[in-house]
């Protein structure tokens, strides 16, 4: 088993001053914007990523 992966930057402000949180596994705190967030691996996609002819990822619509 490998060590847990660490995020490189805050998903909210982009700063790199992150620390593991006491809230539990995968929880991180950003000292720059004072936010806490959690990373969680959900699993592998059964079908994988499929691209259409315009090189857009299918199902990645906003």
Image (cartoon, rainbow, N blue to C red):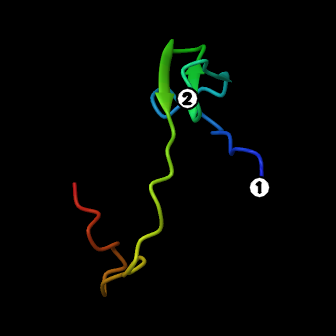
Q: Secondary structure at mark 1?
A: loop
Instruction: State the image coordinates of residue 46 (x, y, percent, origin top left).
Output: 40, 77
Q: Mark 1 or mark 2: which comes first in sequence?
A: 1
Q: Tell me if residue 52 comes above or below residue 11 in the rendering.
A: below
Quadrant in which the N terminus appears: bottom right
**Mark 2 crowdedness (10 Å alpha carbons): few <14, some 14-19, many ≥20:** some
- State the image coordinates of residue 45 (x, y, percent, origin top left): 41, 71
Q: x, y (%) of residue 56?
A: 33, 73
Q: Which residue is mark 2?
A: 27
Q: Seen in the image, is 48 located left or right of residue 52?
A: right
**46 is higher (above) or lower (below) than 53:** above
Q: Within the image, what quadrant is residue 52 found in?
A: bottom left
- Tell me the CA gap for discs 1 and 2: 19 Å
Q: Position of residue 41 (x, y in %)?
A: 51, 51
Number of residues whose C-alpha sits closer than 10 Å to that of mark 1, classed few (under 14), some (14–19) or many (20 or more): few
* Disc 1: which residue: 1
Above-or-below relation of 2 to 10: below
User: For the residue labelled by badge 2, is the local secondary structure a helix, a strand or a loop?
Assistant: strand
The C terminus, quarter of image: bottom left
């Amino acid at each position: 088993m490998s060590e847990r992966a660490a995020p490189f930057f805050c998903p909210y402000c982009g700063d790199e001053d992150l620390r593991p949180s006491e809230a539990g596994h995968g929880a991180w705190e950003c000292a720059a914007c004072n936010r806490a967030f959690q990373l969680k691996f959900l699993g592998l996609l059964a079908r994988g990523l499929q691209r259409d002819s315009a090189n857009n990822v299918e199902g990645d619509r906003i």
